[in-house]
Amino acid sequence: MMRRKQGTMIALAALTLALGVAGRAEAQGLLFWSTQAKPVEETQKMRTEVLGGFGKPVDYYGNDAGPFFTRIQAELKAGKGTIALLGGLHGELASLSSDLVDLKDVLSAAGDAKINPTLVSLGTYGTAEQKYLPWMQASYVMAANKEALQYLPAGADVQTLTYDELIAWGKAIREATGSPKIGLPAGPKGLLHRFFQSYLYPSYTGSVVTKFRSPEAEAMWNAFKTLWEEVNPASTNYGFMQEPLLTGEVWVAWEHTARLQDALNQKPDQFVTFPAPAGPAGRGFMPVVAGIAIPKTSPNVEEAKALAAYMLKPETQIATLRATSFFPVVEVTLPDDMPAAVKMSGAAVAAQSAAPDAKPSLLPIGLGGLDGKFNKVFIDTFQRVVLRGQDVRQVLDEQGATLKDIMSESKAPCWAPDKASEGPCPVE
């Protein structure tokens, strides 16, 4: 019992010290409280290289989610606070949305900054208010060896590719080279579940959860079985696609930008990057979006709004890219001294999110400890339908029942692209 009391006292002392330090810092400038750029090096770059040009003192603190929420929730409960500005991922800020200041006027005052409209819409959380402003983004894109371009179907453009064209492209490459050369990260360390959740499902069904077992989903899995015939069978061992791209085992791949950088930096003249394909319901993609918000307890809302507007300036966005490796959310011309991977991936990320048929799909929100089981539903469906050849309708009905149980247990409401729900997101 004594040890437990001591542990509690130590934890409270640590929290008090953290609040005290942050409180003293806030007295010197605006307190920017964030879950991003947490490593010491990134935090220092944020303070000097990014925020140093604001013209007024800003104290930037990067936190893990626990301390971040403990502090802001305490201030919101008290009805007053010292945190001027918040930075966090879309899903993190969602739980605070009712306590955030409307930032529509900051958008109007952004000047010449051309802010990505798709990302701006995410910051409303389906309301009439701008709950947060997009700050920076990452994503998954396509990359291809330039040798593959000669086999594109007639009239196809990699910048506006469809899944039907990708299948035809893969078939032409296989017939010309004697082996399938599309690659997907389907190994144990790969991120293939994100491909299904945020690219394939939204592109064919306009949904992730609600239409999981719909007729559109059934057509999608049958189309993917055809695509898989053009996928290098070694894909079930791939974790990072940069390696098979460099060896030439794969000529066309889908992957997270961070997992392509070695190939793009080593041989930038050998590869091209481009948006993910589109399906019947649009061009599904996953923007990993960080936003800037102002809590209603901010001690200086007007100065916080000025700082938010400053963060959207093209030159500030480029400085943020250098500091964090997250890409801009406004139109910018990247300097020549940027690494090749940054320039190439950044162009594809921007084109993907700005596409007229863009259909963003967010990271799951509200699943808690069931996130792993949620991902497993998609991987199990892939393995049963594609690798084992089981009946698509039967698998979707069975896995759909599992997904419905997960949503009911977690009580997680729908997230984009599914329509907002009252209570657990339904599986039709």
Image (tube, helix red, strand yellow):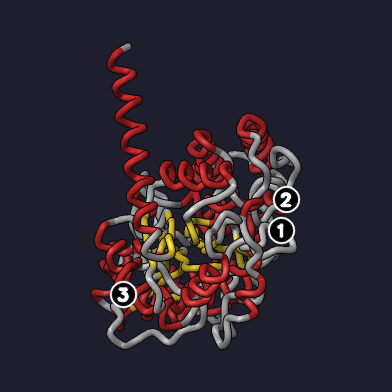
Would you place residue 2 above or below residue 199 in this image? above
Front residue of 399 and 317: 317
Q: Name the quadrant containing residue 163.
A: bottom right
Q: Label 2 near label 3: C-beta < 8 Å?
A: no
Q: Residue drawn at (48%, 81%), measured in percent from left and top? A: 313
Secondary structure of residue under mark 3: helix
Would you place residue 388 above or below residue 39 in this image? above
Q: Residue drawn at (36%, 32%), measured in percent from left and top? A: 12
Would you place residue 233 above or below residue 123 in this image? above
Q: Which residue is mark 1?
A: 126
Q: Which residue is mark 2?
A: 420
Q: Residue drawn at (38%, 46%), measured in percent from left and top? A: 19
**Residue 49, numbered label:** 3
Front residue of 283 and 416: 416
The amino acid beneath tag 3 is: Glu
Residue 219 position within the rendered picture, expressed as x and y whole percent measured from the top left: 68, 54
Gap in angstroms between the C-alphas marked 2 and 1: 8 Å
Residue 45 position within the rendered picture, expressed as x and y whole percent measured from the top left: 29, 68
Q: Label 1 near label 2: C-beta < 8 Å?
A: yes
Q: Is residue 28 visible?
A: yes
The amino acid beneath tag 2 is: Ala
